[in-house]
Image (cartoon, rainbow, N blue to C red):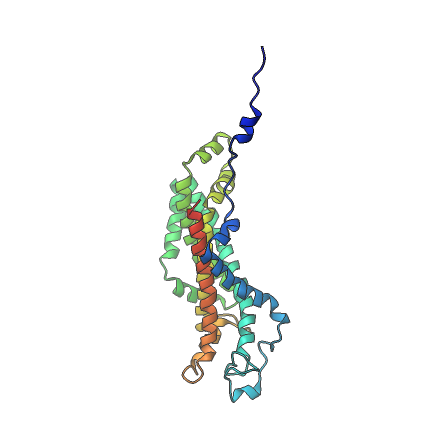
Amino acid sequence: MTATTPDAAALTAAPVERAPPSLLRRLPHSPVAMVGLGLILFWVALAVLAPLLPLDPPNKQDLMALADPRPSWRHWLGTDFKGRDILSRLIWGARTVLSVAPLAALSAYVVGCPLGLAAGYYGGKVDTLISRLSDIILSFPIIILYVILIANIGPSALNIVLAVVLTAAPGIARIVRGLTLEQRHLDYIAAAQLRRENALYIMFVELLPNCRGPLITDFCLRVGYTIITIGILGFLGLGLPPPDPDWGTMVKEGTAMISVRPHMSLFPALAIVSLILGFNLLADGVRELSLRE
């Protein structure tokens, strides 16, 4: 009695099921995402190369430019009301924005994701407690809450991060909770429970990676919201302490002469708009790619 062996030709002809490529590898297939990524990388490159660029220090005053602060060969984007080079202050200010905004959004995710996973996976009293606490914080107008927090704890990069974490984490928790409720009854979760995996493993190894598409999209949008927040706080005088360059503070300082020297406010405002547009376009592209999975 001979044992049957599989046909080699049949094995080679059988189709091999491959895992779909990651979002990062599929990013070039989205023109919208690539435009957004290009805008972000433009500012990242300027921020990284700031010490090497042939520019005046951001706080150096050119007293000769006070008489005529308009753009010139010496100062490509002109100078502000103190004779400081606007281009230099924009580039050095980008270093602060691109470090504080992503760090604040990431910190909010570190706090919000575990809360949302616990609320969606356990349900019951845990869900009720986390949801009610989130509702209380989200019921406050966000800008007013930012102003109250920063006015009380003082303007600094660390305090801005703390304020963003406190105000953004509840919203992130609600998003993660909704995604968890959609996923927790699927077969792969039941299989993990049959393998007697613990709850932490199921939440962070099984559930969270399968929610990556919407969460990456929300993260990009949330970085943009944080950039807006930093700009608003700077405009209200609650941004980074002077003399550090701050885009929102630059817009505010230029408003005093906006009728005769509009470039003092225009260029910082365009910098804020371009960077926020980059993150929004990247978020739209990631959302489209995640929907194709």
Q: Looking at this view, is 174 or 34 the one in front? A: 34
Residue 13 sits above or below residue 222 on the image: above
- Kindly identify the residue that appears in the image at 45 percent across and 77 percent down: 265
Q: Could you tell me if residue 230 is visible in this image?
A: no
- Kindly identify the residue that appears in the image at 46 percent across and 79 percent down: 263
- Kindly identify the residue that appears in the image at 47 percent across and 75 percent down: 267
Q: Looking at this view, is 50 or 185 the one in front? A: 50
Residue that lies at the very extreme toward the right in this rendered image: 52
Which quadrant of the rendered structure holds the N terminus?
top right
Q: Is residue 59 left or right of residue 170?
A: right
Q: Looking at this view, is 98 or 197 the one in front? A: 98
Which quadrant of the rendered structure holds the C terminus?
top left
Q: Is residue 260 left or right of residue 40?
A: left
- Kindly identify the residue that appears in the image at 46 percent across and 35 percent down: 188
Q: Residue 163 in the image: state x and y as whole percent.
A: 47, 61
Q: Residue 17 in the image: state x and y as whole percent.
A: 51, 36
Q: Residue 6 in the image: state x and y as whole percent.
A: 56, 22
Residue 68 sits above or below residue 136 on the image: below
Q: Residue 51 in the image: state x and y as whole percent.
A: 63, 70
